[in-house]
């Protein structure tokens, strides 16, 4: 008997290459925009390790191309924006393709909250205490277990996520272009503490079928819809998929954005405070005038431990001249214990790193950081 609720489609693509993943994204987006496909939830796993850059990113600025080549890691470009990421066969990917009305909002932060909270409910059904953490992560006990992101393309929302089953954190760190200090044993151990895997938490890896079932149920409840399972793409979608695959498997597609590494230097700063030594490495985009990423290390004490990860997230892709204001906003709303540390100690470390931009004072902001 029909429930009378709207019916959406769910597709399990199974193991796919990175190029097939990207081609399916584009085919489904185009089909949904043209009214050739219903709202769709899709799942897949990755047949091979791959590094995926965002649509607007430069491969050389984001990835260690030599490491990828030496370890058989495919490089591919997504159809959506956002940052670079590493995936492998231990990652389960999922995507929602929704028209704007069904998404229920134009605010991407609100969309992220709604979808991530639903996904977290699904993951909890596997037996772990998964929770949404703004802006777009899902965590278990403060450790990231799924990353998500989304964008509108015309009137269609593409929102995707990746669930970590037995993820190789060290491999990820070596694929992405980050400071060498982050590849030291202590830094790798710290990174592992920030990431959770379902195999580690559950003692075994859940099957793709089990993950699909709990996620379908969670999204069905959230959006008030019933899902119909489809064997694959429709003939019009398959035609679009084949055309997209022919394009994305080319060097021209992958290398269509090429910017020199010199435009995104890594800057290092050190500040000795009463609470200990603070080191920071900054990956900056001098053309756009933004902090791409910040990494803090040192011998200081903070509680909760993940405060540093949250500060790094607050600084990600933030305007360079406003770094002091960004730090102030962060600490203004963050309850933290810092033994003999002040927020000014972090801005001082950042300012010391940015001394290398003295020829570009407009990028450093006005005034020296106290401390």
Image (cartoon, rainbow, N blue to C red):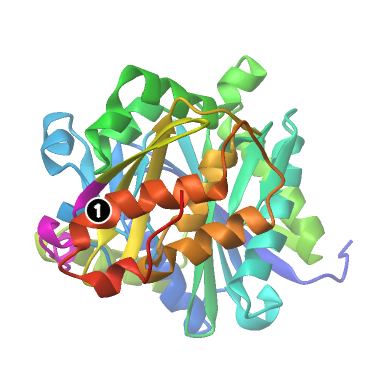
Evaluate whether residue 230 shows in this view.
no
Q: Quadrant of residue 128?
A: top right
Q: Residue at x 48, y 45 (%)?
A: 345
| Percent x, y of residue 341 | 56, 38
Q: On the rendered structure, is 193 left or right of 84?
A: right
Q: Quadrant of the N terminus?
A: bottom right
Q: Quadrant of residue 199?
A: top right
In the foreground, 41 or 358: 358
For residue 279: magenta? no
Placement of 88 over or under 192, stated as above or below: below
In the foreground, 160 or 335: 335
Q: Which residues are magenta?
A: 253-267
Q: Residue at x 57, y 60 (%)?
A: 328
| Percent x, y of residue 106 | 62, 80
Q: Residue at x 32, y 31 (%)?
A: 182
Find the residue positioned furthest to the top.
203
For residue 262: magenta? yes
Placement of 205 over or under 31, stated as above or below: above
Q: What element does badge 1 sit on?
A: strand
Label 1 sits on residue: 76
Q: Quadrant of residue 357?
A: bottom left
User: Is the residue marked by circle 1 packed among few (<14), some (14-19), or many (20+) residues within 10 Å?
Assistant: many
In the foreground, 74 or 106: 106
Evaluate whether residue 356 shows in this view.
yes
| Percent x, y of residue 243 | 25, 70
Q: How many marks?
A: 1
Q: On the rendered structure, is 61 left or right of 121?
A: left
Q: On the rendered structure, is 244 left or right of 236?
A: left
In the foreground, 365 or 108: 365
Placement of 292 over or under 38, stated as above or below: above
| Percent x, y of residue 46 | 38, 40
């Amino acid at each position: 008997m029909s429930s009378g609720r709207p019916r959406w489609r769910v597709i399990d693509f199974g193991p796919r290459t990175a190029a097939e993943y990207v081609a399916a994204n584009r085919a489904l987006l185009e089909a949904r925009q043209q009214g050739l496909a219903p709202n769709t939830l899709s799942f897949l796993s990755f047949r091979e390790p791959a590094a995926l850059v965002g649509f607007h990113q430069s491969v050389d600025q984001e990835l260690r191309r030599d490491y990828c080549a030496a370890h058989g890691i495919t490089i591919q470009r997504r159809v959506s924006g956002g940052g670079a990421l590493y995936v492998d066969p231990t990652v389960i990917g999922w995507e929602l393709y929704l028209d704007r009305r069904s998404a229920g909002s134009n605010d991407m932060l609100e969309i992220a909250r709604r979808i991530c909270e639903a996904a977290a409910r699904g993951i909890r059904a596997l037996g772990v205490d998964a929770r949404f953490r703004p802006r777009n992560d899902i965590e278990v006990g403060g450790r990231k277990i799924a990353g998500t992101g989304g964008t509108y393309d015309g009137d269609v929302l593409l929102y995707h996520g990746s669930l970590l089953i037995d993820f190789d954190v060290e491999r990820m760190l070596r694929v992405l272009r980050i400071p060498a200090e982050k590849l030291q044993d202590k830094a790798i151990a710290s990174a592992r503490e920030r990431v959770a895997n379902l195999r580690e938490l559950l003692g075994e890896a859940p099957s793709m079928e089990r993950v699909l079932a709990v996620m379908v149920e969670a999204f069905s409840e959230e959006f008030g819809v019933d899902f119909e399972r489809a064997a694959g793409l429709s003939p019009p979608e398959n035609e679009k998929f084949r055309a997209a695959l022919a394009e994305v498997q080319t060097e021209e597609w992958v290398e269509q954005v090429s910017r020199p590494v010199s435009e995104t230097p890594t800057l290092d700063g050190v500040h000795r405070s009463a609470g200990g030594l603070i080191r920071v490495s900054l990956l900056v985009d001098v053309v756009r005038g933004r902090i791409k990423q910040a990494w803090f290390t040192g011998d200081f004490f903070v509680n909760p431990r993940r405060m540093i990860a949250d500060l790094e997230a607050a600084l990600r892709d933030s305007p360079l001249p406003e770094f002091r204001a960004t730090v102030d906003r962060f600490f203004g709303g963050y309850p933290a214990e810092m033994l003999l540390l002040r927020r000014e100690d972090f801005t001082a470390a950042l300012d010391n790193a940015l001394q290398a931009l003295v020829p570009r004072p407009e990028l450093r902001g006005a005034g020296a950081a106290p401390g």
